[in-house]
Amino acid sequence: MDEALERSAKPGFQLKGWHVLAGFVAAFSVIIGVNIFMATQAVRTFPGLEVKNSYVASQQFDTRRVAQEALGWTIWADEQDGMVHLKITDADGTPVRARELHAVVGRATIASEDISPAFAWNGSFYEAPLELADGNWNIRMTAIAEDGTEFGQRVVLHVIR
């Protein structure tokens, strides 16, 4: 019996102060490392400001919106055989050729992949040669109507092969 009592009295693993310190340091190192990684990615992929002064831009928003809605334009985009098509129609469904058209095609979150293709009018719609990978793309377009009204819209383009 003395032998059994002696074996049970021998200590097994004992939690010491340095074990607790190592656990805290390891846990907080992981947390801080993930935070630094996420902050770096956020700053690296930030596309920049849309406008210099959002308050000034907001003062003209309703005026621009009403003028744009008065045009009655509908925008539709697709991609087929390496060509991106951008179709603008008026309220009657008639194709519209804008006085000027500028568009940027890119991913929603990565500005480094943005492309400004040269869209050309083919008599019915605008088109540009552009090979897009599968996924969601945004076309941020600005068109100037014949009467000088500026029309801006973001068109979502889903490419599925």
Image: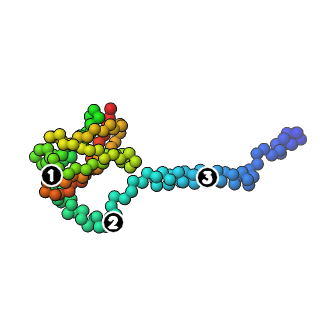
Q: Residue at x 23, y 40 (%)?
A: 127
Q: Residue at x 14, y 54 (%)?
A: 146
Amino acid type assigned to the residue bearing label 2 in the image:
Asn
In this rendering, position of residue 38 left or right of residue 138: right
What residue sits right under mark 1 in the picture? 72
> How was this image coloured?
rainbow
Helix, strand or loop status at disc 1: loop
Question: Residue 158 occupies which quadrant of the picture?
Answer: top left
Outermost left residue: 92
Residue 29 numbered tag: 3
Distance CA(mark 3)–CA(mark 1): 56 Å
Residue 53 numbered tag: 2
Residue 47 numbered tag: none
- Residue 91 visible in the displayed image: yes
Amino acid type assigned to the residue bearing label 1 in the image:
Gly
Where is residue 43 drawn, in percent x and y?
46, 55
Where is residue 153 drawn, in percent x and y?
25, 52
Q: Residue at x 33, y 38 (%)?
A: 132
Distance CA(mark 1)–CA(mark 2): 28 Å
Residue 52 to residue 137: above or below: below
User: Mark 3 or mark 2: which comes first in sequence?
Assistant: 3
